[in-house]
Amino acid sequence: MKTRLNWFVFGMLSLLSITIANAQEKAVPVFTDGEAQIVEAFSNPDDWIRHDLWVETTFDTDGDGKLDRMHVDVTRPKQTDTEGLKLPIVYESSPYYAGVAGDADGLFWDVNHELGEVEKPRTHVEVVRTGERPIISNSQIRTWVPRGYIVVHSSSPGTGLSQGAPTVGGINESLAPKAVIDWLNGRAKGYTTPDGDEAVEAFWSTGKVGMTGTSYNGTIPLAAATTGVEGLEAIIPIAPNTSYYHYYRSNGLVRSPGGYLGEDIDVLYDFIHSGDESKRAYNNKTVRDTEMKNGLDRLTGDYNDFWAGRDYLNQMKPMKAALLMSHGFNDWNVMPEHSYRIYKAAKEQGLPSQIYYHQFGHGGPPPMSMMNRWFTHYLHGVDNGVENDAKAWIVRENDNMQKPTAYKDYPNPDAKQVVMYLGKGGMIAGNLQANKDKKQGKEVLVDDATISGNDLAQAEKSKNRLLYVSPILTEDLHISGVPQISVTLASSKPAANLSVWLVSLPWNSEKGTKITENIITRGWADPQNHKSISESEPLKPGKFYTVTFDLQPDDQVIPKGQQIGLMIFSSDSQFTILPKPGTELTIDLDKTTLQLPIVGGEEALKKATK
């Protein structure tokens, strides 16, 4: 009896050992110091399961009487099939995956005309679709799948094999990723084909989703988040366009994004419209040639219902997702105001929020460790304390982008707005100072769009700009926040461009100059919108108006030995409509001020300029 019992115990122990061994052999995500680690069992691309499907949405935007379906691809570790493993999802959506239109002659609006003049028609182009099934994109996969995530992509409406029409910020571009997230949570239908009824279920999904992407791909996570969709736990938008008005207009002024002079929302529509060729005529007529044509208003540049519907700040109330925002202070394509306005609103709503800013141009994700900690906490549920990390991370001027400096917040809480005044002499270089001198009078500049802002800033003397400079800095001066200018001016014509640059002088024109060395920040406005960005009126020549507006957000240390220069001019050859030279702007120096956010406030300015 004892022998039989011993053999029974031995057998049970052996079975238990085998069970434990099998359990230990199962691959699971691994976390160290609050970050998901690369797991060898998830790392072989040959073992990944890749497939595509179509998710049914709640809208029909291509007019065929059927709900549009979005093309989706999935890349997941084999263990989601072989071991029943469920994992969270990193999701990126884009209108660019299937190709874009080339820069054909006439695709962009011709900006060489007088302000308020009806522009000649531009050329439309057709996108030649690219890409093969089942792969929509390879982005994010090698980063996240080995760390225990599933990666999902989708083409946005009217692009690639996704049905519908592109609307460039319309409601369907928010509802499309929402539908995909709903499918990942079992609330929407997925199918193996765009028109069939064979269902696909996301049995491998935990339902927790994080979204990321750059530029338009960074806009879509915010668009999805504004729907309040359950399951979207965290987003990491990188240089996102958060308002198409702010992308194509500035304070009532028609203003192109940097590097794309003459682009507008209808141009971007043509650029991305890579969807079903048979649906394009309907989409063009409905979206581009009706809704956009009637709403974009290149004559006045006013903010209206069309633009308000494409401003995600207006749609943020339902948002629940944690926000890690990323942007470059010298991004003159999607300018830094886009990220700041959303970050500020998210904080005010009490959402978990952090912001990462670097000193370079368009794009640039946060360091991998920051992204990893964000997704590890909000998607895997690991208590790594990320919600208690510093709110703002700024890459200082000469630092590596992977090594930002932590701050309590952005703008720097120690920054205070300092009012600076103008002293006469702007044709050469007047004064920019904290003390106001009486009766500085008025000075005149003559518009000439053939001269670049760079050349104007370097000119020793020019009638085409007014320049006001601080004393030479004896100590470094830290600017952090949103400068604001109030200009009192009169125009010789009923319409005029107004451009303002804040520059660091002397200008460094040597090859290899860092992007931070010359331009501190910039801003543009239409004096016709001096009352409101939604209301413009022709200027009465010779009558003075006060125009108050923000420059782009910045956080920059101006080194000692430099001077801060405020340059006021009219047409900006890189950004605005370019009328013939000759419009005169008269600036009332006694009624023009600059508010500069300086860390340490007036005391720091006095110390640096004594």
Image: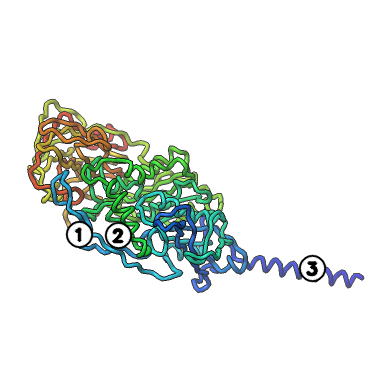
- Distance from Cα at disc 3 to Cα at disc 1: 80 Å
Question: Which quadrant would the N terminus be assigned to in this image?
Answer: bottom right
Judge the density around disc 1: few (<14), some (14-19), many (≥20) Cα neighbours within 10 Å.
Answer: few
Q: Which one is earlier in the sequence, the residue at label 1 or at label 2?
A: 1
Whether residue 293 sits left or right of residue 314 in the image: it is: left
- Residue under label 2, please give it: 271
Q: Residue furthest front?
A: 65
**Residue located at (29% from left, 37% from top):** 598
Q: Position of residue 14 (x, y in %)?
A: 76, 70
**Marked residue nearer the N-terminal end (3 or 2):** 3
- Position of residue 410 relative to residue 270, above or below, is above
Q: Which mark is residue 565?
A: none
Question: Marks 3 and 2, Cα distance to the nearest angstrom?
Answer: 67 Å
- Lateral position of residue 29 relative to residue 491, left or right: right
Q: Amino acid at mark 3?
A: Met
Q: Is residue 28 above or below residue 263?
A: below
Q: Residue at x 17, y 36 (%)?
A: 538
Callout 1: SS: loop
N-terminal-most mark, 3 or 1? 3
Q: Which mark is residue 12?
A: 3
- Rendered residue at 43%/37% (across/down): 348
Identity, as a three-letter code, of the amino acid under mark 1:
Gly
Render colour scheme: rainbow
Instruction: Name the residue that disc number 1 marks.
Output: 106
